[in-house]
Amino acid sequence: MTAVGAWYDAVIVVAGQSCPYAVRPGLPSGSTPTPASRLLAEHAAGAPSDHVLLLDVTAALPALTAPAQCQITVGFHHAGMQAAAQRGLESAHRQVTWLAPGAEVPAGSMAAVYIEACATHEAWLRRLVEGYIALRPGGVLWAAAPNDAGGKRLSRDVTALFGSAHERSKAHQRLVSAVKPATDRDPLPWQEVAGIWPRTVWPTFMVAGRDYASLPGVFAHGRLDDGSAVLCAHLPNLQGSRVLDLGGGVGVLTGTALARGARAVDVIDVDAIAVACLQRTFAADPVRVAWGDVLDGLPWRDATYDVVVSNPPFHAGKRTDESMVHAFVSTAAGHQRPGGTLWLVANAFLAYGPLLAAHYAQVSRVAETPAFVVWQAVR
């Protein structure tokens, strides 16, 4: 079964150019071009470069305003946001190179880098370092973010890495630019923070005797989140089961399933950082890892599972958005044999009973805490 979200195509005018983009429920900002992405796109139109890198810029908007001769590479952490950008760029017949999850851009290869900064500080620093490494000396960094979601610290961080920065504010957004110096600062900042610079020691944390890789920016970085802890405590013996973990994060549900006897686990996450962590943690285990948006279904189209486990998100950015949970539940049900079981944890205030009952024959609340409910649903 494929749980495809409904796409809506639209057009926005930036720097005098008509820029197509795609929107659907369940994506951060709904994939609508943000004020920060528009600021970056305005500067891309007026600053032609021979080779440009875009990192997490909504709708890849600068790729639509940059001069046609630019060679553009685009990277996203969020698989759904990449899918939205691909749809918009295809509508505009704009050719770009897509950066694979976890792939490193050749050092010193870019004339300009555009970053839409995220609110999570360590994740933003990691992206900033990636952009710095990708730039050649004399290349220009452009970074933007809302004032209330990380924008106020952009200039400080860029200055710490580049030596100086130029800042401007517009429409409650901050736009910061900097030129990469001919020689690196000594010492470079944040080298003591695990996971910020590439090829440093990976941060890990232990749960029930297994080490889990965890990089800045992944959900519940460096800790076992409370919801997953409650679900793990109530998972039954899974001896011989084939298990699907929807939205795996750092993989604690996958690791618990293996410890309870699962013979194989497939795990999917929308976040490229999570996928990198999962691949590292389970490199020696019978685990398949995929980067993808559950709104598009699974890459394993014909797979069926005895058990599905999930701690699904219910936010798209700052907005409550149940379209993701609907996709998780319908995808789980569509890939389970009769008698297969879904184990799901959710915040106590979320009434998922009717949703589960629409797809499963039996639904029960297995455990409750003041904050969480563990649901069991039998196909």
Image (cartoon, grey):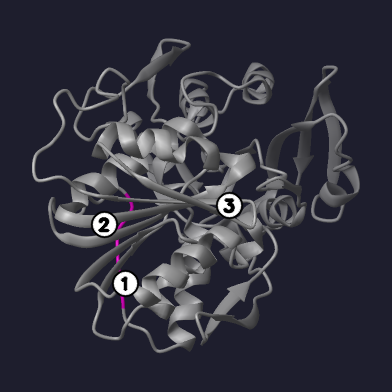
Name the one closer to the observer, 236 or 63. Answer: 63
Three-letter amino acid code at disc 2? Val
Q: Where's residue 75, x and y in %? A: 36, 59
Secondary structure state at the residue bearing disc 2: strand
Which residue is under mark 1? 47
How many angstroms separate mark 3 from mark 2 (CA)?
A: 19 Å
For marks 1 and 3, the one nearer the N-term is: 1
Three-letter amino acid code at disc 1? Ala
Name the one closer to the observer, 311 or 179. Answer: 179
Instruction: Name the side, left or right, on which 146 lies relative to 61.
Output: right
Within 10 Å of disc 1 (Cα), the crowding (few <14, some 14-19, many 20+) is few
Residue extending furthest top? 209
Secondary structure state at the residue bearing disc 1: loop
Which residue is under mark 2? 140
Question: Are the residues flagged by discs 1 and 2 in contact, CB closer than 8 Å?
Answer: yes
How many angstroms separate mark 1 from mark 3 (CA)?
A: 20 Å
Q: Is residue 99 magenta?
A: yes
Question: Are the residues flagged by discs 3 and 2 in contact, CB closer than 8 Å?
Answer: no
Query: Which quadrant: the N terminus?
Result: bottom right
Instruction: Name the side, left or right, on which 9 lies relative to 85.
Output: right
Figure quadrant of residue 196: top left
Instruction: Name the side, left or right, on which 355 lies relative to 237.
Output: right
Q: Number of marks in the image?
A: 3
Name the one closer to the observer, 144 or 179. Answer: 179
Q: Which mark is residue 173?
A: 3
